[in-house]
Image (cartoon, rainbow, N blue to C red):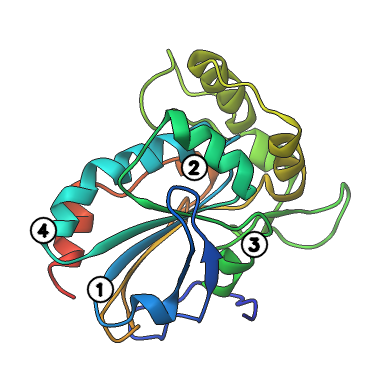
Amino acid sequence: MTDRIRPLQPGEAAPAFVLPAANREGLASLASLLGRPFLIGFYRGLHCPFCRRQVGQLSSLQPALQAMGVETLAVINTPLERARLYFRYQPTPVTLLCDPDCRTHRAFGVPRVEFLPDGSSERSEWPLRTTMADFAGARINPGGEMPEPVPPMEANTVLNAKDGFELDEADKKIFANHGTQLVGHFLVNAQGIVGWAQIEAQDGPNSIGVFPTAAEIIAAAGKL
């Protein structure tokens, strides 16, 4: 797999990948999926409360997508054993794949935000690079669970506490290495060609954590 500088667009071929599954035995690959359409979501690790919620939302969509002949997969930036432990208590019908190095995220071109050094003369170019001040100035509350919008990192803390979720050492390592990874969703047709793509927070950090609507995904799946 090679890194892309921009997300895959409709009409482009999905890259080959092979990843271990957390909630079933064996591996999943592009080759094993060809012949039927699929929706694949790329998420930050379990440390991210928005990603845990989005996997839950994807789970609620799975029956409708299955009825349309569309398989549903979620790639999570979490080590395999950690993911297996978590989803033993939080089962999901979605096929969960583990990529603790975000290699597949990068192959599909899902952006990772880089912070410019203090005093840098380089121009901010969201979602590729931004200043820490601009990021910290964002205010989010995508699910309306908090009394008011707060900075993204504060939102993580608030929602993890609400969930009673404590980061273990694996989560902390993933957060340190890939904490600014964005989320992306792609619908891929039976021939392996992208038919629809959605990237988190394309218009800026104030929309971090916003998930595409069920109607949007179902409509896009119907056009494959």
The span from disc 2 to disc 4 (Cα, nearest Å) is 30 Å
Front-most of 177 and 117? 177
The span from disc 1 to disc 3 (Cα, nearest Å) is 29 Å
Front-most of 153 and 117? 153
The residue lying at 57 percent from left, 47 percent from top is: 44
Mark 1, secondary structure of its residue:
loop
User: In the rendered structure, which disc, 1 or 3, sits on the residue that comes first in sequence?
Assistant: 1
Whether label 4 touches label 1, CB < 8 Å? no
Whether label 2 touches label 4, CB < 8 Å? no
Residue that label 2 marks = 208
Q: Quadrant of the C terminus?
A: bottom left
The span from disc 3 to disc 4 (Cα, nearest Å) is 37 Å
User: In the rendered structure, which disc, 2 or 4, sits on the residue that comes first in sequence?
Assistant: 4
User: In the rendered structure, which disc, 3 or 4, sits on the residue that comes first in sequence?
Assistant: 4
User: In the rendered structure, which disc, 1 or 2, sits on the residue that comes first in sequence?
Assistant: 1
Discs 1/2, front: 1
User: In the rendered structure, which disc, 3 or 2, sits on the residue that comes first in sequence?
Assistant: 3
Quarter of the image where one finds residue 169 = top right
Residue that label 3 marks = 128
Residue 16: percent from left, percent from top:
51, 81
Mark 2, secondary structure of its residue:
loop
Indicate which disc residue 37 carries.
1
Q: Quadrant of the N terminus?
A: bottom right
Indicate which disc residue 159 carries.
none
Around disc 2, counting alpha carbons within 10 Å, would you say few (fewer than 14), some (14 to 19), or many (20 or more)? many
Position of 57 relative to 101 (above/below): above
Residue 58: percent from left, percent from top:
31, 46
The span from disc 3 to disc 2 (Cα, nearest Å) is 14 Å
The span from disc 1 to disc 2 (Cα, nearest Å) is 27 Å
The span from disc 4 to disc 1 (Cα, nearest Å) is 12 Å
